[in-house]
Image (spheres, grey):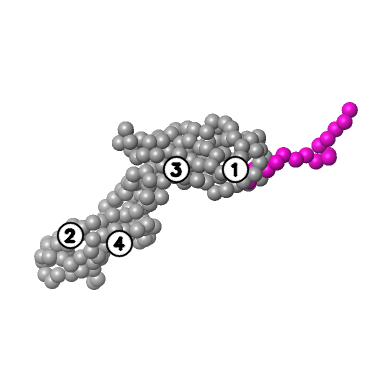
Amino acid sequence: VVVVTDAFDNLVTTPAVDITTEAFSDNTCATPAVGTMGITTNPVQTTAGVATIAGLSFTKAGPIYFRASSAPLTNKCSTLVTITHDVASALAFDQLPSSYIKYNVVFPTQPQISIRDQFANLVTTGPDATATITLSLQTGTGTLNGTAFMDAVGGIANFVGKGLNISQWGTKVLRASKASTIPMSGTGIITADSASFEVAAITCNTGDLTSS
């Protein structure tokens, strides 16, 4: 709710004015927020000095401020509003093994998978934030070796130290699966496939050979 007042904070009931709402990332309402604001009607016309803002939402999780404006009146910046993430609906591969790693050799860069909502916000709380993530080889021959499952921490499953490697060379695609957390009031199984990457055959140079 936005009200129109005079210099002494008295309600000004006439004339009706149009109130425009915008989202900002700072408490002075100087820097526009990154994301998409939802609102039923914008601007909203006052009735007896009062404008009721309906259906206000924002897609980016985190701290945000809303500004009400109606020229030539003085703008008003809201107090801090914290936007929380939506329910889990997707997985993202934040990190993948680099191409042309060697088969049967532990990936120098281990995969990292994050649990996201429909707006790509990280799911940091609730049962899905600690759901079990399992990796499997979706495309390509061979076996994914190492510990290919772990519980996410704050919505992130980082497989550093899990010793993942693939037993054969070629083009590979990994699949990540989030276990169902429906019994804990979470979401069902969610899967996502990685971009493709190459696992190379191990070769040796003549300088590596010795004889006795």
Magenta portion: prevailing SS class: loop
Earlier sequence position, callout 3 versus callout 4? 4
- Residue drawn at x 34%, y 44% is 87
What's the residue type where badge 3 is placed? Thr
Above or below: residue 34 compared with residue 96: below
The residue that mark 4 highlights is: 22
Furthest-top residue in this view: 212
User: Which residues are the magenta region?
Assistant: 198-212
CA distance separating discs 3 and 4: 36 Å
Contact flag, marks 2 and 3 (Cβ < 8 Å): no
What's the residue type where badge 1 is placed? Gly
Furthest-front residue in this view: 141
CA distance separating discs 1 and 2: 57 Å
Q: Give the numbered dot on residue 191.
A: 3
Furthest-right residue in this view: 212
Query: Which quarter of the figure is the N terminus placed in?
Result: bottom left
